[in-house]
Image (tube, coloured by chain):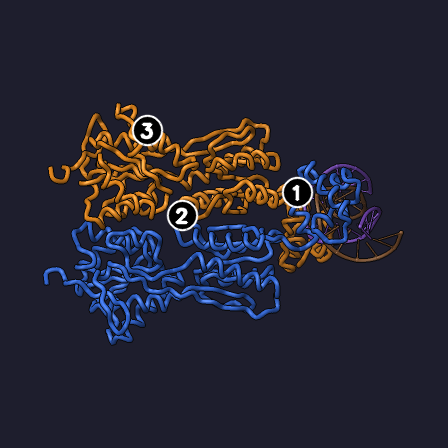
Chain colours: A blue, B orange, C brown, D purple
Amino acid sequence: MATIRDVAQLAGVSIATVSRVLNDSSRVRASTRQRVWAAFDDLDFSPNGAARSLTTRRTNVLGVLLPDLYGEFFSEVIRGIDLAARREGLHTLVSSAHAETQTILSAARSMRGRIDGAIVMAPDASTAEAIHRIRDRFPLVLLNARFEVPGCSSISIANLEGAHEVVKHLLRLGHEPIAILKGPSGNIDAEERLRGYRRALEEAGVEHDPTLELAGDFTESSGYRAAGEILRHPRRPTAVFAANDSMAMGLICSLENMGIDVPRAVAVAGFDDVAIARFLTPPLTTAHVDAYRLGERAVALLLTALSDPEAAQKHETLPCPLVIRETCGAHHVWESGRVFAVRRTKEGE
Amino acid sequence: MATIRDVAQLAGVSIATVSRVLNDSSRVRASTRQRVWAAFDDLDFSPNGAARSLTTRRTNVLGVLLPDLYGEFFSEVIRGIDLAARREGLHTLVSSAHAETQTILSAARSMRGRIDGAIVMAPDASTAEAIHRIRDRFPLVLLNARFEVPGCSSISIANLEGAHEVVKHLLRLGHEPIAILKGPSGNIDAEERLRGYRRALEEAGVEHDPTLELAGDFTESSGYRAAGEILRHPRRPTAVFAANDSMAMGLICSLENMGIDVPRAVAVAGFDDVAIARFLTPPLTTAHVDAYRLGERAVALLLTALSDPEAAQKHETLPCPLVIRETCGAHHVWESGRVFAVRRTKEGE
DNA sequence: TTGTAAGCGTTATCAA
DNA sequence: TTGATAACGCTTACAA
């Protein structure tokens, strides 16, 4: 592989000049530049990134640490990050499957000298310590973290408010009792959505019933399995708020297999608004999460932290607007100037 | 940030010794090693990757060049790559949105010195030139390429065979005529799947009818839009092979909105077996693509190319087995020792 | 077992 | 406008 030394020799100049041409610092005569360019072409030269970043202390690479890469959410986040990064001429170094303190720490270690900063997603409680410890290695942006870390910017989604809206919607349609299919405990999204559910019920004056809070783990199959428990419940719920779309889909699938009509017999709402939600039969009512934008904004935050390390850390929250489709009732009606879905006749009524 | 020099000073040894401890070359006395380790901890030291790879000519990073990052397929490929890479202690540098020769070339350039090799996905015809030109920069593995490049290993999926099986399945159920909803022209997957469709029909002695080959572009909405054309066709097809699941889903959704029963009135088959396929109503019959495994195998191929650059390039093909669900007919029956789906009574029969 | 010193391919600081 | 040359942080002969 050709180096600037080879180029210099071929072009009959010093390596310093080659470097100047490379970084187009203007102090190079046009004719010399031409010769150097020609040599670049001849040797098919491209500068070595490692060598470059050793002197400049700049890698032009953004690190991304994620707990997993599975599913639409993560892939959209990465897409948002990568595209935003490329717009700024930066590359993206991903590393997934970092749920525990140890792995997140060693991943951050091994990224030392290869990245300028990192976007870290830490939805679990246990990762706080790890983040505190890598904080001084390079600028960090926290994605959906459950804690604020001094000196780090962060961005998250409006889980609580979104869930609150979903459940208020269910309430407005006259549902009672309303169950929740929870996400994994310890997961920030799951917990915030649960809080949103509780708050909406509390505000409506509905008494808290813990038996209506069903265990789930965000997987389709946990949604599938929950159907039985819902139907057998002594106070059989007329609506279920699944803490994410995957569980909502598994639940609906199972319900329909058992001959239970959604939404007539049981209404179901989800959270995430995955791409497929609108194509389900019936189309899923859910709260929209803009994962792409989340990644995009994270890059923006990291960029400002990079350019001005002294700047105050910022915290952004992305709204999760309610998307009314058909799993909670198909009819729509105007009410106080807005469209609301209205509950279908109940089965057997 | 601490360097080995700081560590050496604190531990009272030379930088060479620190380096030896870092790479645990055995020639270090146990007590010395302890002192160095202690210094590592004290200074919270971790070695600079750029400096390291400058001397070793090894970055321990794999590059990934993709045309896009959108959708389940790409995210699964990346997941397979990243996890396989991490198992080997390697990082993954992704760069997406490389459809054109120019961008793929400049991305490869800018990765020089930051990666040991790359996995490149080039499903479009136009990228051949770019790949030939980056081939000598570092070892390459081609993902789903439409051409073989001397010196590069490659891996792809059995598009033709998979499509062939899907259409044979439709044929076996007695469908006639069978339409295809094509993917974007120039895309290798789309073209191979079309060939599989044609071959199956040809083998069955069905005369080729170009009007049954409908334009599509792999998006849900193109599937949605195709419904009208199918229903208005003078020889209205009883089955449609959509070249991917997205289009199949759009099509089914549109068909059902128009009150057309799937599979009774029109059967639909897809390709990809996306995660949601089994949860659709009715569950989608399709050909399974193991994107995760594709990424995983690509890493394995790259690794062998890395460890032995002289080794013969390898070419792998991942099978795409038919997954029979319900969009082509719900009944199943034993026939010559295997399960086949049997066509439901036709609407109005 | 340890230390010295020469790179690795750049950029950056001086002089010229 | 150019050219020497010293970093950058590490690995690796070669010596001790």
In which chain is the residue bearing label 3? B
Residue at the spot 24% in from the left edge and 36% down from the top edge: B239
Of tags 2 and 3, the one toward the viewer is 3
Q: Quadrant of the N terminus of chain B?
A: bottom right
In which chain is the residue bearing label 2? B
Residue A1 seen by the camera: no
Instruction: Residue under label 1, please give it.
Output: A46
Q: Are marks 1 and 2 on the same chain?
A: no
The amino acid pointed to by label 2 is Gly
Place of residue C1 in the rendered image (x, y in percent of width and height, measured from the top left):
71, 45
What crowding class fits label 2: few (fewer than 14 Cα within 10 Å), some (14-19), or many (20 or more)?
A: some
Which element type, helix, strand or loop, lies under badge 3? helix
Instruction: Residue under label 3, please give it.
Output: B198
Instruction: Residue under label 2, please give it.
Output: B71
Residue at the spot 57% in from the left edge and 52% down from the top edge: A90
Which element type, helix, strand or loop, lies under badge 2? loop
| Vertical comparison of A110 with A7: above or below | below
Depth check: C7 or B324 in front? B324
